[in-house]
Amino acid sequence: MLAPLRALVNECLTKWEGTIDVRTPEEWSASPVAKPVVIFDEAHLTYYWGNTFRQRLWETFYEVSLTAELVIFLTATLPEWMRRDIELMGHFDRKLWVDCGNQRLRFAPKSYLRFPGKTLLLSFLEEERKSAGCTLVFCAYRQEVTAVAELLRKKGRSVLTCLGGEAAEFSRRLALVGTCDFIVATTVLSHGVNLPLIQRVVLLYEVGNEDFWVQMVARGGRSGAGYEVLALEKPPGIKWNPVVNFLKILWITLRIKIHFFLRQEWFLKD
């Protein structure tokens, strides 16, 4: 089995060590072996990451396609055109696609609130009273993860962070604390890594890619639990009322301004 995330490999080894050979693509290429059946987990990442910063994904994919008798692809988000492209890149005797998901959420959020800008969204997170559940915040850049985490900690919230390459260490820290108020991360947590029950997903940038959007939003409401999404873009594929959204944003903006006014200290000068 090939998995693109180190934390996912570690989790699989804990469950199946001795019964299934689980590796990252880099580990496979460093010591290639001929296996009759090979599973590619999160197969869509071969296309996205392999074309950008993880070229080893494509190299390993090609090596496996030449030697394996059966290749099984696992993914929850894979459009038909991408599947064809992936198949054309290899030489397969037999292949099987499992749980493609067709870019649809299994459980839609109970509410989806689109904010007109990042500043208002961050102000809302700052001002809101502490909620009972865990909020997962996705940031576009590593520096933004650090800045947002510090902002929330100053408000007395418990925060865990995760950047690319830190998924295994994040899983270790999460196991120690169990849960927290906020998890702030890059897209590394959109795939594979086990999380506590997420009651709110926050997207601090316009994702643009529907596959990644589905993966990120689907981190909330696992097993059917209710969750909400706060984002900067219109939701693809789910019901959303722009008029209701406008009224909610208007009320949030007014509430933030009132809170800001009440916090000010007014001094009379002689």
Image (cartoon, rainbow, N blue to C red):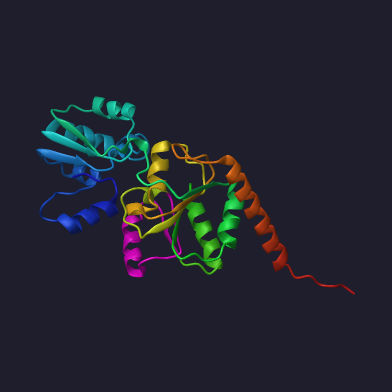
Give percent across and percent down for residue 235.
Answer: 48, 40
Residue drawn at (87%, 72%) of the image: 269
| Residue found farthest to the right | 270
Quarter holding the N terminus is: top left
Q: Is residue 138 visible?
A: no
86 left or right, relative to 19: right
Q: Is residue 195 visible?
A: yes
Quarter holding the C terminus is: bottom right
| Front position in the image: 223 or 139 | 223
Give percent across and percent down for residue 25.
Answer: 24, 43
Vertical position of residue 151 compared to residue 41: above or below = below
Vertical position of residue 238 compared to residue 17: above or below = above
Residue drawn at (15%, 41%) of the image: 32
Locate residue 84: give its quadrant: top left
Residue 178 among those drawn in magenta: yes
Q: Which residues are magenta?
A: 159-186
Give percent across and percent down for residue 154.
Answer: 56, 67
Locate residue 133: give its quadrant: bottom left
136 left or right, relative to 84: right
Locate residue 171: give its quadrant: bottom left
Residue drawn at (34%, 31%) of the image: 79
| Residue found farthest to the bottom | 270
Residue 183 among those drawn in magenta: yes
Count of labels in the image: 0
Give percent across and percent down for residue 148.
Answer: 52, 57
